[in-house]
Structure formats: C-alpha cells, structure tokens
Image (cartoon, rainbow, N blue to C red):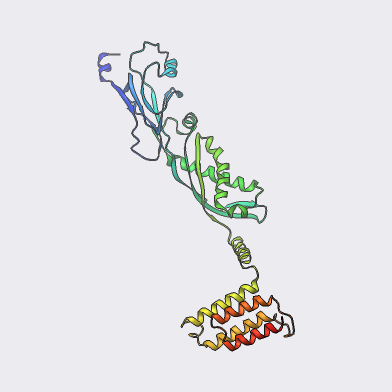
Amino acid sequence: MGLFSFISKQFIDVIQWTEQESGVLAFRYPMEGMEIQNGAQLIVRDTQTAMFANEGKVADVFEPGTHTLTTKTLPILTYLQNWDKFFESPFKSDVYFFSLREQLDQKWGTPEPITVRDKEFGALRLRANGNYSYRLSDLQTFWTNISGTSEIYRTRDLEGQLRAIVLTSISSFLAQSDVAFIDMAASQSDFSAKLKEVVAPEFKKLGLELTGFYVQSLSLPEALQQHLDRVSSMRMVGDLNKYTQFQAADSIALAAANPGGVAGAGAGLGAGIAMGQMMVDNLVTKPGSSDTDSPTEDPIQMLERLGDLFKKGILTQAEFDSKKAEILSKI
C-alpha cells in the first residue's frame, strides 16, 4: 500500500447505531472507504445486537455494552482472517446492527374472504382482521434467510410475507380443526390464543418470536349471522309467551305516562285499559280454554302480576278487585 493510499483511508474509532428511524430491523454500518482501527470501540445499546460478518458468514456477535475490538474480542473473525495475536493494523469487516425492539401493532387481514370448511356449517367464506407483534430472536437465521446484505431492512419489507404466513396458517388451522368455528368465534380471546399457537412456529422459521396475536374483527356470512342471532334471541327469551306478555305490559305503562304514547296516537287510556284487561284474562285462562278450566299458573304468581298491572295504572281498582276475586275463587 502506498503512503498516499494509507493516508487517504479513514479509520473508524467508534462504531454505533443510533436508531434514528423507527421500524428498522437490520442496519449495515457503512464501511466504504473506511477500515476499523484495532482497539476501536463498539457501542451496542440495550435494544440492539451487533454482528460481524466475513465473506457471507456470521462471525462474532456482541450483546449490549461497550466493547473494545481486538483479536481477543473478535475470536471468530481473527480465525477467519488468519490474524495472529499481535495483530495491530486496521481491518475491514461487515458490521450489522439488529433491533431487538418489539414491533407492535402490525396489521393483518383478509383482502378477500377465505373459504374454510366447518364441521357444523360446511363451507364458509370469512373475513377477519387484527394485529400482531414480534421481535427478532435468532439473528443468524434472520440475517441468512431474510435481511442478508441489505444496507437497511425495515418492517415494511417483511410485512407482505408475514401477512401471507398468517392467512395461510389460519386457513390450514380452520380446515383441520375438530372444534366448530362457531365455538371459537364465541370468544375472540380464546380464538386469538389458538391462532397464535399455529402462527408462532412459522415466524420462528424466519428467526422471529411472535409476541402477540389478536383477532379484532370477524365477519361471518350473512345467513350464518342471522341464524346465530335467532338462536341467541331464543335463548335470551326463554318462554316466548311470558316474554310477549311482559313486553306488552311494560309498553302500555310507558305509553300511558308518555303524551306521545298510546293516548297521543288516539287510542286513549281506555284502549290501554282494555289491552290490560285482555292480558289479565290471558293470565287467568289459556287462550281457547273455557272459564271453568283451571289456572295455567300458580294463583299466587298470577296475583302478583295482577298487582303489578294495577300499580302501573293499567287496571282500575274495580277491575283489580274483580279479577282478584275470580282468581281467589279458583284456589
């Protein structure tokens, strides 16, 4: 090497990465026209790991801290370069920094409905979306298979591949699962946990740890959603006849107290009382049965309901006394 060439070279005393840009997974330290001074300082921050590479091979890896670069602290690179223990000259090497930060709020979703076969409902076309988070866990795997010699590798460079992994894993899981999809969809937290178990091994193959996975929205086919709504409503209602009677009585009471209710519609309080009378008749006898039939329910319960109608103003005192006497006569 000529004297001018030696003088024109720039020697690096401090190697560090300040992570001024968010969303960066890997950064190659610029080495063009520069050599590392033997005894230089390598500064690795708490959220980073640094790696020296030689001719496409991983050499020495450094955890967070300040490191003095010598043949003792670079044993693998020393071996690959055939340096002896008295080496003092500047040297060249590729230096990569990796961010160990957790990459939060990464989006996933189905651009088109995915078709799955459910054991209960058959073929279903579903839409879903949510988010996930990950961090680097195996630098050698990630560098060898993903980032390589890129000057800078960002999360957006990887998101397409990760989204494909998520969607493929979900489709395969739902197709092979013995658990009905409706049971999974009933609890999104459990569903998210199951999907995380499926997706995590695929992330690991890339040198990534899947730290979180969440299903935020799940759109069922309209026909299936209507069926589930009907089933849910029936379970909530229980006895449909009792629910109808309660709903009607409550509505009449609200209308009587509201100027825009039954009276405002022109029906008048008399219509409300007549409707109340019909309801009381239903409480006492079954529709289509004769007056001599026995009560359909316990007399005490019917008296309690009769009292509620009277308190709401639906029945007059005379009507209440008459029906009360009728019920007591059949005990």
Q: Is residue 37 visible?
A: no
Query: Residue 285 location in percent, x, y?
Result: 69, 81
Query: Residue 211 location in percent, x, y?
Result: 49, 41
Of 121 and 245, the residue lying toward us: 245
Residue sitting at 57 percent across and 44 percent down? Answer: 169
Residue sitting at 59 percent across and 79 percent down? Answer: 307
Locate residue 157 relative to residue 12 in the image: left or right: right
Quarter of the picture holding the C terminus: bottom right
Locate residue 92 relative to residue 283 in the image: left or right: left
Up-down: is 1 above or below 229?
A: above
Q: Quadrant of residue 196?
A: top right
Q: Is residue 313 visible?
A: yes
Number of numbered discs on residues: 0
Q: Quadrant of residue 283?
A: bottom right
Locate residue 77 relative to residue 167 in the image: left or right: left
Of 285 and 225, the residue lying toward us: 285
Query: Residue 209 location in percent, x, y?
Result: 50, 37
Up-down: is 211 above or below 38?
A: below
Up-down: is 93 above or below 109?
A: above
Locate residue 295 relative to residue 37 in the image: left or right: right
Quarter of the picture holding the N terminus: top left
Of 303 and 142, the residue lying toward us: 303
Residue sitting at 51 percent across and 81 percent down? Answer: 255
Query: Residue 66 location in percent, x, y?
Result: 35, 25
